[in-house]
Image (cartoon, rainbow, N blue to C red):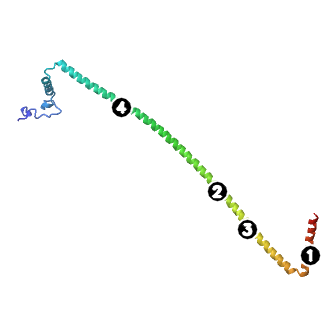
């Protein structure tokens, strides 16, 4: 079988795109496609009149138009619903962000308050410890002073007794005892008379 371009040798040298010429692809040409479609319509639609055919085509086109319009309306409704949901989501986001900011501010103020309470508590505890330390030092100082006083008094009494024992003879000793007995006797008489 011979190629159609071989029948027209002058067309074989022309490029198929970008220039004027015959389209040798029979299936791609519109007049041929249209004649085939019309032939099929005439063959299968012999008993149908032209007005019925146009009516049927018109009905098909109207149905297609209504389906397209319904799809567009549904798409618009879905779009409006999506926009409404988006606005609600944005409102919730703003509310959550506001609450988060409030919690953040409250959290910072609560942290500051706790910090101040802790500082106050620590300073009070340090003050109490300082007072306790001072009382302990004062107590220890008084105890040490009392111990020194007792030692000094004991040493003074021991020296005094040692001095008295070395200086007193029996006659002086008897006179001191008699004088003391006299003083006690006078005190007893005074108590009895009162």
The correct choice, above or below, for 9 with respect to 154 in the image is: above
In the rendered structure, which disc, 2 or 3, sits on the residue that comes first in sequence? 2
In the rendered structure, which disc, 1 or 4, sits on the residue that comes first in sequence? 4
Q: Is residue 141 left or right of residue 165?
A: left
| Label 3: how many Cα within 10 Å (few below 14, some 14–19, many 20+) | few
Q: What is the distance, in whole Å, between disc 4 and disc 2 at their CAs?
A: 70 Å
Q: Is residue 128 left or right of residue 156?
A: left
Indicate which label's residue lies in the foreground, 4 or 2: 4
Q: Quadrant of residue 177?
A: bottom right
Residue displayed at 21% across by 22% down: 57
Q: What is the distance, in whole Å, between disc 2 and disc 1 at their CAs?
A: 64 Å
Residue displayed at 33% across by 29% down: 74
Residue at which label 2 appears = 126
- Numbered mark located on residue 144 in the image: 3
In the rendered image, the quadrant that contains the C terminus is: bottom right
Q: Is residue 134 left or right of residue 7?
A: right
Residue at which label 1 appears = 178
The residue lying toward the viewer, choosing from 191 and 125, is: 191
In the rendered structure, which disc, 2 or 1, sits on the residue that comes first in sequence? 2
Instruction: Label 4: state its secondary structure.
Output: helix
The correct choice, above or below, for 4 with respect to 111 in the image is: above
Q: What is the distance, in whole Å, between disc 2 and disc 3 at their CAs?
A: 26 Å
């Amino acid at each position: 079988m011979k190629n159609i371009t071989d029948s027209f040798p002058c067309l074989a040298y022309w490029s198929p795109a970008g220039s004027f010429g015959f389209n040798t692809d029979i299936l791609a040409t519109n007049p041929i496609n249209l004649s085939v479609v019309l032939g099929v319509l005439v063959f299968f639609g012999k008993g149908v009149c032209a007005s019925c055919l146009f009516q049927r085509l018109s009905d098909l086109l109207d149905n297609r138009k209504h389906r397209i319009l319904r799809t567009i309306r549904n798409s618009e409704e879905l779009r409006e619903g999506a926009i409404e949901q988006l606005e609600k989501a944005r409102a919730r986001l703003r509310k959550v962000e506001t609450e988060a900011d409030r919690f953040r501010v409250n959290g910072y103020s609560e942290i500051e308050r706790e910090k101040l309470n802790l500082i106050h508590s620590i300073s009070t505890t340090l003050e109490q410890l300082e007072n306790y330390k001072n009382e302990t030092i004062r107590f220890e100082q008084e105890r040490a002073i009392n111990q020194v006083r007792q030692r000094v008094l004991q040493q003074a009494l021991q020296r005094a007794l040692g001095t008295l024992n070395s200086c007193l003879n029996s006659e002086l000793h008897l006179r001191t005892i008699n004088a003391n007995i006299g003083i006690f006797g006078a005190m007893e008489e005074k108590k009895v008379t009162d």
